[in-house]
Amino acid sequence: MGDFKDFIGSDKGPQCPRTYILALTDTLNVVSGKWKLPIIAALLRGVSRFKDLLDSTEKITPRMLSKELKELEMNSIVERKVYSQTPVLIEYRLTKSGKDIANVIDSMIDWGMVHRTQVITNPEAGEVS
Amino acid sequence: MGDFKDFIGSDKGPQCPRTYILALTDTLNVVSGKWKLPIIAALLRGVSRFKDLLDSTEKITPRMLSKELKELEMNSIVERKVYSQTPVLIEYRLTKSGKDIANVIDSMIDWGMVHRTQVITNPEAGEVS
DNA sequence: AATATCAGTATACTTTTGTATACTGAACAT
DNA sequence: ATGTTCAGTATACAAAAGTATACTGATATT
C-alpha cells in the first residue's frame, strides 16, 4: 500500500499520488486537535453516551463534545444511534474504521517512545519534558 | 510497545500510561499543522536549503518555513548545519527519528486508503470527496 | 409545583495558527 | 555604486480552533 518514501524522486510535479494525499489528510483530520483522541479512547473503552463521554473526557465542554462527535460521525468514525425510549437514549459507537485507527495510534506511540529514547541518549536535543 | 487498546479498562484513573500520552503528543506535534508534512516530504527527497525548501513547498512563506524548521529542530526531527563559507551555506537534514517518521505516515496512509474503500462500499456515509 | 436528568444549543469571547507584505544584512558580481 | 543571492526577520492582520457561561425542551421524580 502507501509508502511515503516511494513518492520521492522528482522535485517538480505532484511528487505523490493524489490518493495518498487524500488518505493522509483523512487520517490527520481524525487524529488532529485537542479532543479527538481522548474521545476515541473513551469510545474504545465502551463509553457511549453523551453524558458519560462528557464525564470521562476531562474538561471538555458540551459544545466541544457535540462538535467533535458530529465531525467524527461525518467522517464515518462514529455511528449515532437513537433509541426512542423515554428518556431518549443516544449511543455513540465506533465504526470498523473507528476501531481500526487504534493501529495508527499504536504506530504513533511506538515512534514517540523510540524517539524519546533516541533524544535522551543524544544529549544535544530538546523537547524531553 | 505501546498498544492503545490495552489501556482500556477502568474508566476512572489515568487510563493510559503517561509515557504513552507523552509519546503520542510528541508524534502529533510533528505531523499536525498545515506545513509539517510537506516540509518533511521535501527533506526526505533530499531538499536541504532554505531557498530550495521555499521553492518545493508550494505557497509557504519564509516566515512559516522559518518557524516550522525551528520547531522541527527543537523536537530533534531536523538538524541545522551551518557551513561558514561565503556565501554562507545552511543545510537542514532529517535526523534518524525524522526519517523514521515515514513509517508512521505510511500507517496513516494505509488506514486512510482502507477507510475510503470502506466508506465507499458502505453508502450511508459522508466524507468521500 | 418544583427539581432533576439527558442530550444537547446559543452567544460571546480568547487563543492559536496561518497569511501578506515588506524589509535586513552580509558577501559577492558587474 | 548598484544589483543579486542567501537566509532569514518584522509588523500587522485574518482565520481557525477552543473556552466560558448560560440556556433549552422533553420527560420523569419527589
Image (cartoon, coloured by chain):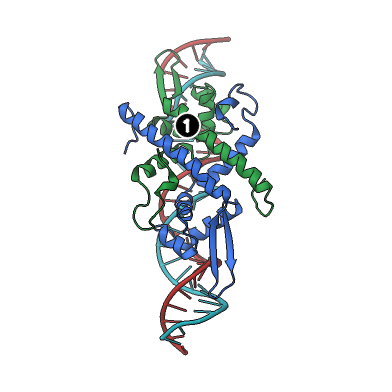
Chain colours: A green, B blue, C cyan, D red
Image quadrant in which the C terminus of chain A is located? top right
Count every numbered label the image shows and give the total: 1
Looking at the picture, how far across and down is residue B26, in whole percent?
A: 58, 43
Name the residue that disc number 1 marks.
A101
Q: Nearer the viewer, residue A118 or A64?
A: A118
Whether residue A45 can be seen here: yes
Whether residue A78 can be seen here: no
Image quadrant in which the N terminus of chain A is located? top left
Q: Nearer the viewer, residue A88 or D21?
A: A88
Looking at the picture, how far across and down is residue A2, in whole percent?
A: 41, 40
Q: Is residue B4 above or below residue B83?
A: above
Which element is circle 1 on?
A: helix
Residue type at numbered disc 1: Ile
Q: Nearer the viewer, residue A58 or B61?
A: B61
Looking at the picture, how far across and down is residue B54, in whole percent?
A: 44, 61
Q: Measuring 54% from the left and 49% from the top, which residue is drawn there?
A: B98
Q: Is A39 placed left or right of B60 in the picture? A: right
Q: Residues within 10 Å of mark 1 (few under 14, many from 20)?
A: many
Chain holding disc 1: A
Q: Measuring 56% from the left and 57% from the top, which residue is drawn there?
A: B70
Q: Is residue A81 above or below residue B84?
A: above
Looking at the picture, how far across and down is residue A100, in whole percent?
A: 46, 28
Res B111 quadrant in image: top left
